[in-house]
Amino acid sequence: MGHRVLSTRGRLPGTGLERLASRAELVRGPDSAKPAAADLEALAAGASGILCLGNDRVDAALLDAAGPQLRVVSLASMGFDAVDQAAAAERGIVVTHTPGVLAETTADLAWSLILFARRRLGAARDQLHAGEWTAFHMDGNLGLDVHGATLGLIGYGQIGRAVARRAAGFGVRVLCHDPYSAPEDGLAQPVDFATLLSEADIISLHVPLTDATRHLIGEAELRAMKQTATLVNTSRGGVVDEKALLAALRDGTIHSAGLDVFEREPRGADVADLVAESRLVALPHVGSATEATRAAMVDLAVDNLLAVLAGEPAHTPLPG
Ligand code: DGY
């Protein structure tokens, strides 16, 4: 049945995986849990293509365990920070990802976090759940307005632009900073990094995690923000120094934050301090988690994998 391919998860949203199974000999990883590195290496042996998720570590050991016939690693994710790109390039392996199909859904989630964090809705909901809503207080659960605020987007690629498009309905002015992508849509005013930090009421991060963006937001950057600022991160946890953020929320350096991503994921008890902070809204990495979008990500990943195995160019290879 042609090529042997590995999907690191045995079950994925939509019909993409069944389509792949009809076109190749499909080896399936565990249904939905992340396989351990050693198990992944054993499963990969003999595969010409690997379909994996953004949190699967794709390193030289995995590529070598697959063998010299491996031609493509297709990520069903936009983020590719867990891939050793140099190791793949040295072995002539094409790596693909899934930009485009998740931008709108992730932008919706960024706005959810903006609204929840700025209006302190998480703390208000917790109060209700705890049975502590016993009276109406004129000065209770006060947040800050979203309408009329200035939004600063760090990173102005597909997701940043989708966030900007939603701003008009809130009467929000948009600033952006992106060294690689100049806005042409008239929706955001490009500014330098320092201006964005000091002028924005809401700062939303839309950059990939690279050596250049790791801890892009740390103590100094938090101090440069307004005391009334809200920081939202739906990109990668490592872009923000979590310890510095927790300190900044506790001492009132900034007003609030919304995080969908963490420096290490998944997180349990070790993130309790952050999650318990009443000025932080935290979610377990659900930016692209809708039925349609996750199915579209799998479809695109399958299309990329099949294209490369057929000797055609990938639809969405990793940039540059
Ligand atoms: C992405 O596509 O990068 C999302 O974070 C899901 O992995």
Image (tube, rainbow, N blue to C red):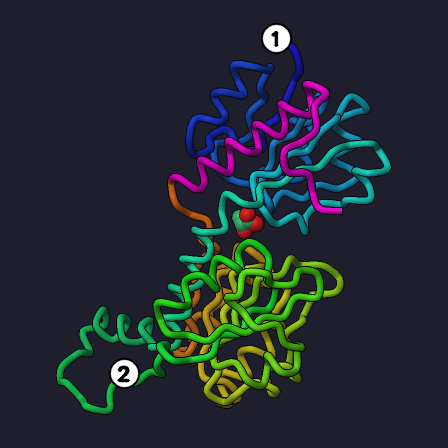
Q: Residue at x 82, y 44 (%)?
A: 86
Q: Residue at x 56, y 59 (%)?
A: 235
Q: Residue at x 59, y 15 (%)?
A: 24
Label 1, secondary structure: give it: loop
Name the dominant secondary structure of the magenta segment. helix
Q: Is residue 272 above or below residue 63?
A: below
Instruction: Count numbered badges in the picture.
Output: 2
The residue segment tinted magenta is 292-320
Mark 1 and mark 2 in contact (Cβ < 8 Å)?
Answer: no
Q: Is residue 228 above or below residue 236?
A: below
For the residues labelled 2 and 1, the Cα–Cα distance comes to 61 Å
Quarter of the image where the N terminus is located: top right
Measured from the top left, where is residue 286 in percent x and y?
44, 53
Q: Label 1 crowding class (10 Å Cα cut-off): few <14, some 14-19, many 20+?
A: few
Left or right of 124? Residue 319 is right
Residue 141: image tag: 2
First reached walking from the N terminus: tag 2 or tag 1:
1
